[in-house]
Image (tube, rainbow, N blue to C red):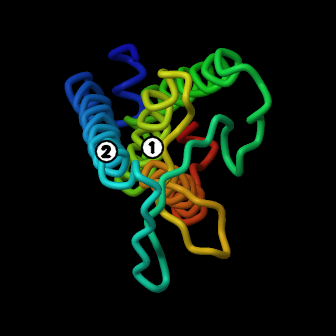
Amino acid sequence: MSAEKARQIGTRPRSVRRFRAVLLAWAAALAAADLVIKAAAEVLLSDGQVNDLGLINFRLLYNPGVAFSFGSSLPSWAVIAATGLIIVALTWYLLSSAPTMTGLSRAGGALLLGGAMGNFIDRLDGLGVVDYLHTGWFPTFNLADAFVTTGAAILVLAAFLHPRTAQEQ
């Protein structure tokens, strides 16, 4: 973003870089947390064990597709390429919009990007995404899925709570 554009929206170039860096740092931290938990789930549940906690239980599954196993019959390289392109576009949008976003929007963006990055990195081995949270009434999912869903919901909520005016755009 140019210095002139930053002045027009009321931010300084240093603030712009900080907004972007913080968003990326949170997304990376969330992705790392997700990957650590997935690794633990693989170790602890690899023998087919199911840990029933009542409302939710832990069981190990691999999802070669995307949400709700959509695209699971596609070659893994195609799913990896498509999700990679989506993440690149999402990252570009979030980084270019971060200076004008509210804190709530940036938090939603970090959750969304962190979850997407966690699942993307997990997918790179060709086995699919590690899923381990099972309810019995909803498809098995993982922490990254919860990040993506929550982040998207927060972004939508923030858009309704703080709509941008024509002057801000």
Is disc 2 placed on a helix, strand or loop? helix
Q: How crowded is mark 2: few (under 14 residues within 10 Å), some or many (20 or more)?
A: many
Q: x%, y% of residue 121?
A: 43, 27
Residue position marked by numbered label 1 in the rendering: 115
**The furthest residue to the front:** 47
Is disc 1 placed on a helix, strand or loop? helix
Q: x%, y% of residue 4?
A: 38, 17
Q: Nearer the viewer, residue 79 or 168?
A: 79
Q: Which amino acid lies under the numbered mark 2 shown in the image of this protein?
A: Leu
Q: Which of 62 and 77 is in front in this view?
A: 62
Position of residue 67 relative to residue 20, above or below, is below
Q: x%, y% of residue 39?
A: 31, 42
Residue position marked by numbered label 2 in the rendering: 30
Q: Distance between the residues labelled 1 and 2?
A: 7 Å
* Residue at 71%, 45% in the rendered image: 69
Q: Is 150 left or right of 79, judged from the image as shown?
A: left
Position of residue 8 relative to residue 45, above or below, is above
Q: x%, y% of residue 13?
A: 26, 22
* Residue at 37%, 51% in the rendered image: 107
Looking at the rendered image, the quarter that the C terminus falls into is top right
